[in-house]
Amino acid sequence: MASLTLAGAVHFWLTHSKKVVDIEPLEHYPSVTIIVPAHNEEVVIAQTTRAILDLNYPAEKVELLIYADNCGDQTARRAQAVLQMIKYKHRNARVIERHGQGGKAGVLNDALKVAKGEYIAVYDADAMPEKNALYFLVRKGLENPLKYVAVFGRNKTRNAKQNFLTRCINQEIVVIQRIQHCAIWHLFKIGRIPGTNFIIKREYVKSIGGWENGALTEDTDISFKIMQSGKLIALAYNSEAFQQEPEQLRDYYFQRLRWAKGNYQVVLKNFRHLFDRSNWRVKLETFYYSCTFFWFNAAIVLSDIIFITNIIFWFIHLFKPHVLIPFTFGESNILIAQLLLFNWLLMIILYVLQITTASATQFGQATNKQIWLALASYFTYSQLFIIVSINAVISVGIDKLMHRDGTKWVKTKRFAD
Amino acid sequence: MVRTFFWLAIVVTLVFFILAMAFAVLQWIIYFRIEQTTLNTDRNEKR
């Protein structure tokens, strides 16, 4: 699976690596309502608001709605202060203080009722869009307005150089954005709404009933709905937004736990589509998700159990020779063991290749440091995925058994730049 | 059984190895193309 994705991405970048991107004026600029759901985001909201208002898109075509959702801090005041600046006073922008339910999905549904734009754009409070981010999204959408009902861009890590954790997260994000997203779009025209830096047609969202209130990953959920209807989520690979990633292990853990739980919920909800008459993209995506979150995970856990058990028994064997190592192909068949070891080495090479290929697609990012970091993260950071996934499976199971509200989540801590 | 697994493992390993080599080469091609395109664009903009 990883080889197929990497092959798709390599082909995508071979065809796009010689393209020079021009910022030509569009034939027409559709109106866009930009929604910023913010929950206790006083640290980052001002910077994000300014970045959005400075976007390279006709000001009269942009409506900005900043939702301070159940905030206990100065989010609304900080955002309002930016809107009061002389430079932005004439802009169609407002801050709405919200005290409703539903989290981010609830905010988006509320905004859907008042939004006037042809498109709805969503930027998380920590996502600072690059100047042309919205322009590229709209340009892609206009390539095929009937089919491309949503367009998504890339997210870059804003605090990548903060510590080892953020460096590793940055590599992971880079691989997801420039390898996975590019490959599945290039090969199958499948897109995934990433939660921030995307646009979607307002009328279309209304027609599918909006966002699902309380869904842990409302974006994955809506992505499935779009694909089910036969429409596409297009990739505008030049559209970039800078977002903050957790700087501490605890914040990282709870963020990923929420994502993993949300993804499990989506897989469970959509698993039946593998066997019914659903759209083939939905089937493929469900298959992909179940491979990543169930089969791959189960294989890793099984392999780790075998590895640890064999090590324990090998240690016992040193002192008590009659005790044998349990999982072998026969002690004399050393060739198979060597082959498997060589395959493990190839797996590590493939892991590093994904990262180096992703780095090579951006000028100045492919460095030796990235290779060493990739090797270090394989044995440390990547292993966290197993812990997060196991915990998510248990948590989803308990939520179902105990009828527990699994949608409560710990908010990712923000940092001032 | 072990014999079948052995030959299966040989085939998988070979395919995997060839793929890894091909990806490594193609990655360098992408790297040089991106560097060249970016440097040429920068040079033209400066002119």
Image: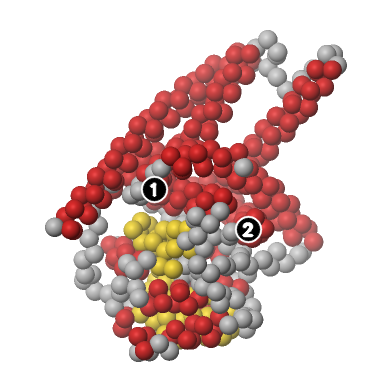
Q: Residue at x 52, y 51 (%)?
A: A167
Does residue A364 sit above or below A351 in this rendering?
Answer: below
What sort of colour scheme is used for the picture? secondary structure
Give the alpha-carbon distance from disc 1 to disc 2, as whole Å.
24 Å
Within 10 Å of disc 2 (Cα), the crowding (few <14, some 14-19, many 20+) is some
Classify residue A413 as left or right of residue A124: right
Q: Are marks 1 and 2 on the same chain?
A: yes
Q: Chain of mark 1?
A: A
Q: Amino acid at mark 2?
A: Gln
Q: Amino acid at mark 1?
A: Gln
Residue A48 in view of the camera: yes
Q: Position of residue A311 (x, y in %)?
A: 74, 26
Q: Position of residue A98 (x, y in %)?
A: 58, 84
Residue A42 placement: quadrant: bottom right
Q: Nearer the viewer, residue A376 or A256?
A: A376
Does residue A59 sit above or below B23 in this rendering?
Answer: below
Element marked by disc 2: loop
Classify residue A74 as left or right of residue B43: right
Q: Nearer the viewer, residue A213 or A271?
A: A213
Q: Earlier in the sequence, mark 1 or mark 2?
A: 2
Q: Residue at x 68, y 47 (%)?
A: A387
Q: Nearer the viewer, residue A330 or B31?
A: B31
Q: Position of residue A150 (x, y in %)?
A: 40, 65
Q: Nearer the viewer, residue A347 or A315?
A: A315
Q: Chain of mark 2?
A: A
Q: Which residue is mark 1?
A: A365
Q: Which mark is residue A248?
A: 2
Q: Residue at x 50, y 23 (%)?
A: B13
Does residue A217 sit above or below A201 in this rendering?
Answer: above
Residue B19 placement: quadrant: top left
